[in-house]
Amino acid sequence: ALTFSCERSGQDGGLTVHFNCPRKGTAGFEVMMDARHVTILHKGKEVLKGEAVTTEREAVHTVKLATLDEQYAVFLDGDCLVSGRMEPPFTENEGRLRCIVRDADVRLIACEESFIVHDVTFPKWKRAELLYEEAFGTESLSRNWACNGERPQVTEDCCVFMPMSVNMLKQRFKGPLAVDCTVTPMPTEDFSAGVTDAIFIWMMDKPDGNLPEYMEGLPDAGLGGYMPLPFYWVDFGGTNNKTTRMRKNPHRHMVRQFHDRARLLQRNKTYEVTLVQNGSFVEFWVDGECWIQRHEEHPLTEGHVGLRSYVAGLKLSSLKIWRIEP
């Protein structure tokens, strides 16, 4: 939401607000306000041309974009001007804010970005039946895991997934379930943060085939080979430990992103991480605290569980998968 007033506007003057601008290409949403019209574009296509708002100096206006799951709405001064659905690959759901002023003096008063969720009660759950427990060792690795890329380093009590690799359990699970894992990011000399990109994956599926066989046919562990598949994933401490974000595939749909230090990786720290698929809800927990909760209109309810190491190693010392119930 951007709040502003127009101190002066020439005959052809106006303000354009770009919401969710990529580094290159067209902004996700553009709201253009001048003396004649308010025009709104979605991914470069006009979705509204309405009446102009007052440009009196004392008038204060607020333009707001709201996105929730696949839906969007644009508001001006509290009134919804246009709403609709976003289309894959949902690139208009993230990006930068940009203002363009033409032959005018505009006073920016406030800018606010807030995280919103569905107005629903997230159900509580408890662990019930144990579906899988990692035994470690070379036999378990061979029998239970499909590994693409660099081979893991295995001992009798832990496994270190090496960069770059994708490592998925061969067993296919059906929710509702909770995945408990104990992980330690392994430092690397190649990146200044030392630890980076601990990636957790759940409900990865190959709807028209077998996932382990598909992984065997990939040339490497590059993420591009997995982008067409549906799955949830959290990149904990991604981009050289600058961000933690959750996405839903296919199409890399952004769910939630953090930049604060408290939600990035720390050197030499072991984390207790829990991944949850609970019907129409997904959750991501770290050290007993729920960081992300999401209501899903079209949830991913079946698939495989695993981890990805991108540019740093990831030590796994415990893994349990539970059936959960209310």
Image (cartoon, grey):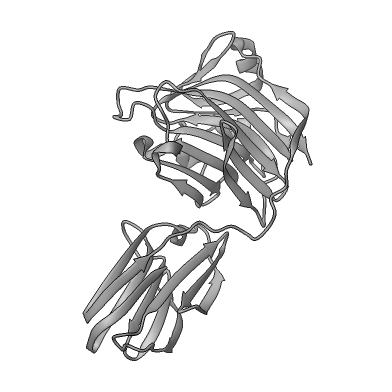
Estimate the x, y position of residue 10 in percent, counting from the top left.
Answer: 21, 88
Q: Position of residue 71 (x, y in %)?
A: 56, 66
Vertical placement of residue 18 versus 77, above or below:
above
Report the residue that reaches farthest toward the front: 58
x, y percentage for residue 250?
55, 49
Quarter of the rendering containing residue 206 = top right
Q: Position of residue 247 (x, y in %)?
A: 52, 47
- Which residue appears at 51% of the width and 45% of the height? 246
- Above or below residue 43? Residue 106 is below
* Nearest the eye: 93 or 273: 273
Q: Is residue 133 above or below residue 101?
A: above
Image quadrant containing the C terminus: top right
Quarter of the picture holding the N terminus: bottom left
Is residue 300 depicted above or below 195 in this figure? below
Q: In the picture provided, is 12 more to the left or to the right than 51?
A: left
Please indicate whether residue 179 sits to the left or right of residue 35 in the image: right
Q: How many marks?
A: 0
Q: Residue at x 41, y 63 (%)?
A: 112
Whether residue 5 sits left or right of residue 180 in the image: it is left
Looking at the image, can residue 39 be seen? Answer: yes
Q: Is residue 210 visible?
A: no
Residue 61 versus residue 48: which sits nearer the camera? 61
Q: Residue at x 54, y 41 (%)?
A: 233
Q: Quadrant of residue 239?
A: top left
